[in-house]
Amino acid sequence: MVTGGGVRAVVWDIDDTLFDYTGANDAAAREHFAAEGLPAGPAELARWTAVMHEHYARYLTGELTFDEQRRERVRAFLGEPELPGEVAAAWFERFGVRMRAAWRLYPDVVPALDALTPRYRHGLLSNSNSAHQDDKLRRLGVRDRFEVLLCSEELGHAKPAPEAFEAACAAMCLEPAQVAYIGDQRITDAEAATAAGLHGIWLDRAASADGAGVRHRITTLAALPALLAALGD
Ligand SMILES: [Mg+2]
């Protein structure tokens, strides 16, 4: 364990932090619904997103496997609870092809990594499945910028549980006070990381007005080097 010396590493959230999950999901869903002969308006998009949140939460509690939550999302969205698993999986995979084609890093990610490296080490902590996120980061060309990738499925702990953040620090042989955690979710990422003893940073890309009470908030990764410098060496 390395002790002292201020912030040594940044641990990053992935979806909607490094990668525009919401934008990719919306674009892919619109194309997919149209290709399936379904309405593809705002109401359908909102329902698809609500169904995603509902069943992804069941995955994070361990109630469903990663693949089961995908099938359940399809059944719920189509209103066909008895839809056979292979049919639901194939429907989701047709969406998945479009989703992967829409994957993009936010344009401020690589410049921020360049500016922060080698002064800071980098890791990843995501509420997801490691194989899925590893594939995503390799396709996006940034997997090798991060020393470790920890995901809730393999850890057995999902953010906001402190154990998830503690595991990320342990994987980098650092104390929580030596690690900054950055993510797009104010409570699940920033406040939970702070509660676990890390420097929690909320990446509020929408520059929402609801930033009160958050210790560290930035609206672009371009502001991250200065914030980390202000946290001290
Ligand atoms: Mg996120």
Image: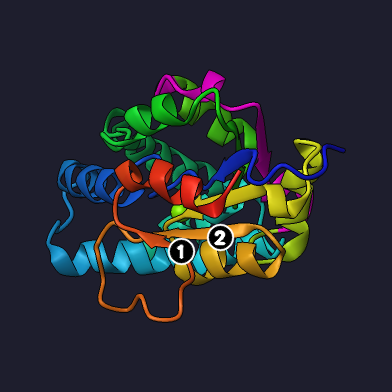
Q: Is residue 168 left or right of residue 185?
A: right
- Disc number for residue 79: none
What is the number of the mark on residue 200?
A: 2
**Which badge, 2 or 1, comes first in the chain's sequence?**
2
Which amino acid, by three-letter code, is at mark 2?
Gly
Q: Which residues are magenta?
A: 139-157
Residue 178: in magenta span? no
Look at the image and tell me whether residue 79 can be seen. Answer: no
Label 2 packing within 10 angstroms: few (<14), some (14-19), many (20+): many
Residue 34 on image: x %, y %: 15, 46
**What residue sits 56% from the left and 34% below the top?**
132
Residue positioned 33% across, 40% down in the render:
95
Instruction: Say which residue appears at 71% left-offset and 42% top-offset.
Output: 5
Provide the secondary structure element on which disc 2 rests. Answer: strand
Q: Is residue 18 left or right of residue 209?
A: right
Residue 216 - label: 1
Q: Does residue 56 sit above or below 181 in this rendering? A: below
Q: Residue at x 32, y 79 (%)?
A: 210
Q: Residues within 10 Å of mark 1 (few under 14, many from 20)?
A: some
Q: Is residue 183 something one can see in this rendering?
A: yes
Picture coordinates of residue 67, whole percent (x, y): 59, 46
Toward the right, the furthest residue is 1
Contact (Cβ within 8 Å) of mark 2 with mark 1: yes
